[in-house]
Amino acid sequence: MYRIEKLVERLKSEGFDGILLIKDSNIRYMSGYTGADSYVIISETARAFITDSRYTEQAEAECTGFEVIKWRHPAAGLEETIQGVCSKHGIKKLAFERDKMTYDLFERLSNGMKSIELIPSSGLVEGIRYVKCQEEIENIRRAAEIADNAFDEVLKYIRVGVSEKDIERELQYLIKKKGADDIGFPIIVASGKRSSLPHAIPSDKRIESGDFITLDFGAMVNGYRSDMTRTIIVGEPTDKQKEIYDIVKAAQAAGEQAIKAGVQGSVPDDSARGYISQAGYGDNFGHGLGHGVGLDIHEEPFMSTRCEKILQIGNVITVEPGIYIPDWGGVRIEDTVLVKEDGIEILTKSPKDLIIL
Ligand SMILES: [Mn+2]
């Protein structure tokens, strides 16, 4: 229960009596609950899990140490239920997650609970999630391994004539077949000129000879995600395709080499971006170098030129530079890596030499 103790400590130091959690990933992290549509209140003494009849049985089984409280007709309304927990535990200043609270819910709660001060907060749980424990790392490691296996097998399926959607569906099936609870996030398949779209949605476009294909995908294991991208080519690459690929590959290696505990998140970004800029393609790399990954697919630290976060042992982050040239195509190469004292462990192990199908 060290997670809850750490949160209580943080609440105290910020001057809050308690916190209302509504973000699924934060609720899962704190309570073990794997479902949705629920609320958690944590304070020095409160471990309250508020849900409705659809989820009470599940919550009672999953949330050890929590009091499961049912709300919604015929039980009390949400405001009344939260108010009840707060009165019981002497909570007057109740923090909430400012990036998740809707205006609707805020209005409803503040009108319905006049004696409680609702105060916006940010990153209280995420700050604890920032460094992964061994069990979390094992889940991500397994997710990365499943994604590697699925990638290896989907290569046999990719050929001239199949569509991006066909590839997406095959890869999705393979990720689940190889043991994932789910895919990590919606799969990106971008081929030919469409590979210049960093976050392309798979289309009906069919693969042609000479196409780069960018595949960005991951697996989910016990709620934890992996994230990887490989760009492959069908048919022989042109000199320009080889040039762009090699620049991204070298930039990706430069980014990875710059990562170790104690380094500011902007440093690896500078390193990869510097390489791409020197090669003349700085304007074609518009996004940050990478992001944390865990219960959410995008979480702290967000590595960019402005990132001030210090990388720590136990961060799990992506390293994903790319070059995108409109109306021509693009290349991105991405690993999920574990930050260690002197460097990294790369969790996604698929080859990074250009695969020619
Ligand atoms: Mn990513």
Image (cartoon, rainbow, N blue to C red):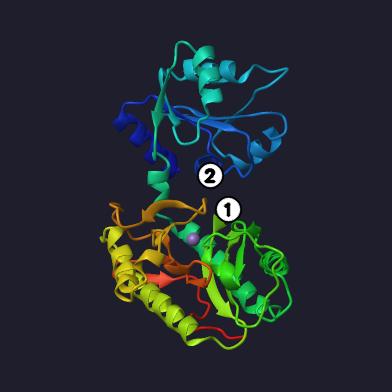
| Residue sitting at x 52%, y 25% | 103
**Numbered disc 1: secondary structure:** loop
Q: Does residue 63 lie above or below 16 as drawn?
A: below
Name the amino acid, label 2.
Ser
| Residue sitting at x 40%, y 28% | 120
Q: Does residue 184 lie above or below 91 as drawn?
A: below
Residue ID for mark 1: 223
x and y, in percent, of residue 331 in the image: 49, 72
| Of 67 and 147, the residue lying toward us | 147
Mark 2–mark 1 contact, CB under 8 Å? Answer: yes
x and y, in percent, of residue 312 in the image: 32, 58
Q: Which mark is residue 128?
A: none
Name the amino acid, label 1.
Gly
Between the C-alphas of marks 2 and 1, the distance is: 8 Å
Quarter occupied by residue 104? top right
**Residue 15 falls left or right of residue 175:** left
| Of 119 and 244, the residue lying toward us | 244
**Residue 12 falls left or right of residue 24:** left
| Of 45 and 242, the residue lying toward us | 242
x and y, in percent, of residue 320 in the image: 44, 66
Residue 215 visible in the snapshot: no
Q: Which numbered disc flags the more N-terminal residue, 2 or 1?
A: 2
Residue ID for mark 2: 25
